[in-house]
Image (cartoon, rainbow, N blue to C red):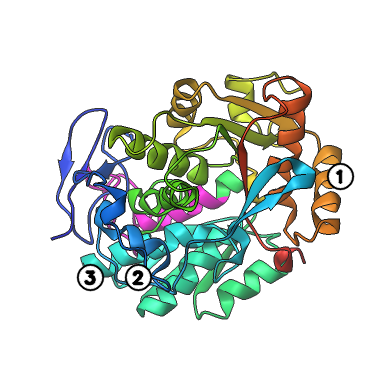
Amino acid sequence: MASDLVCPDCDAVYAAGPDEPWRCDCGSPLEFADRPLPEDPGALKLEPGRGLWNFAPWLPLEERVSLGEGFTPLVDAPEWDADFKLEYVFPTGSFKDRGATTTLSRAAELGVDRVLEDSSGNAGAAIATYAARAGIDAEIYVPADVKAAKLGAIERTGARPVRVEGARQDVTDACIEAVEGGGGDDQDDAATRQTGDGWYASHAWNPAFYAGTMTFALEIAAQRDWTAPDAVVLPVGHGTLFLGAYRGFSLLLEAGIIDELPRLLAAQEAGYAPVANRFGEAVAAEPGHTESVADGIQIVEPARLDEILEAIERTDGDAVALEPAAIEAALERLHRGGFYVEPTCAVAPAALERYREDGVLDAGSDVVVPLTGSGLKIE
């Protein structure tokens, strides 16, 4: 039976179903009512080919839609004095497949026949691909200037892309309006019910997506003989991977599998740095400026900002924002080192260097950095 949804803020409970709300009526994000706790990992049989679904007993949903995603390589990068987790080798070329497999599995479990998503490109391509795998129609809202490679990845699945002029938030607003059936005064009091064109498969709001990104932390622990690193440096837009890491490591800590949480260190680009502005350093650039290298994290209003800040506080983490020049230099260095990634990926390695320069990380710290998207999506 599919898990119901619950609001952590007001304790409201919503029955699972294709018309379940995409957020609580109080405005807060929803979570799964069911929360499986890991057991002894020694009893967990890791099977080749099952990917992240090896952790199915620890997830609050059933495996319904999969392309064998997960267990991406964790490789030594001695020139960076870190380990890189190669999240760009997923079926659609980005870590967003972690959330797409669980989100579309949830949609299939509920009998959904149409999903909507808004995205700068990677999440849209992932949701569209897994929707095609599930035989579910998809409509993906994207910025008007979305990169051709990402737009093509969406179109070739048979999904319908909707290009929206304006800022990234305008894309989200247009998608939500479609989900809610256009809004208006005659709308039900439950304004966040999915009464419009389809089910909101949002990578920012849908709890099923975070169930998938949580496996990032579970994999790291498993690949390290069930230990956690000292720190993880991650790019942050809506924070889907950042919060997934926090949830996964927190679950392992609660189960007694690891002894302490790794420090979670956020990496943003100046001008799109709400986390760094609120927690870390003041960023001089105007919010939402258009000169950006890291198009994948151009988010000025993260849906779960308070959760991101809480994760940083609880893990003794930090947040920094990088200028485009530092990101471009890190990108060139990554390419020359054999890591063919897209520009957004370079934000975290650039931040790794900044954290070391600022003394936030010691030279000998055991650090993991995810490389989140393929360079094949650059054009």
Which residue is pictured at 49% across the width and 61% down the height? 71
Image quadrant containing the N terminus: bottom left
Label 3, on which residue?
A: 111
Residue carrying label 2: 114
- Closest to the observer: 193 or 372? 372
Q: Which residues are magenta?
A: 171-198
Q: Quadrant of residue 326?
A: top right
**Mark 3 crowdedness (10 Å alpha carbons): few <14, some 14-19, many ≥20:** few
* Residue lying at 28% horizontally and 70% vertically, measured from the top left: 108
Q: Earlier in the sequence, mark 2 or mark 1?
A: 2
Q: CA distance from mark 3 to mark 2?
A: 9 Å
Q: Position of residue 140 (x, y in %)?
A: 50, 65
Q: Position of residue 123 (x, y in %)?
A: 53, 59
Task: Answer few, some or many: residues within 10 Å of disc 2's Cα (few below 14, many 20 plus, some between 14 and 19).
Answer: some
Mark whose residue sits in front, 2 or 1: 1
Left or right of 356 on screen, residue 177: left
CA gap between label 3 and label 1 equals 47 Å
Marks 2 and 1, how far apart at CA: 42 Å
- From the image, state whether disc 3 or disc 1 is nearer to you: 1
Magenta stretch prevailing secondary structure: loop
The numbered disc on residue 329 is 1
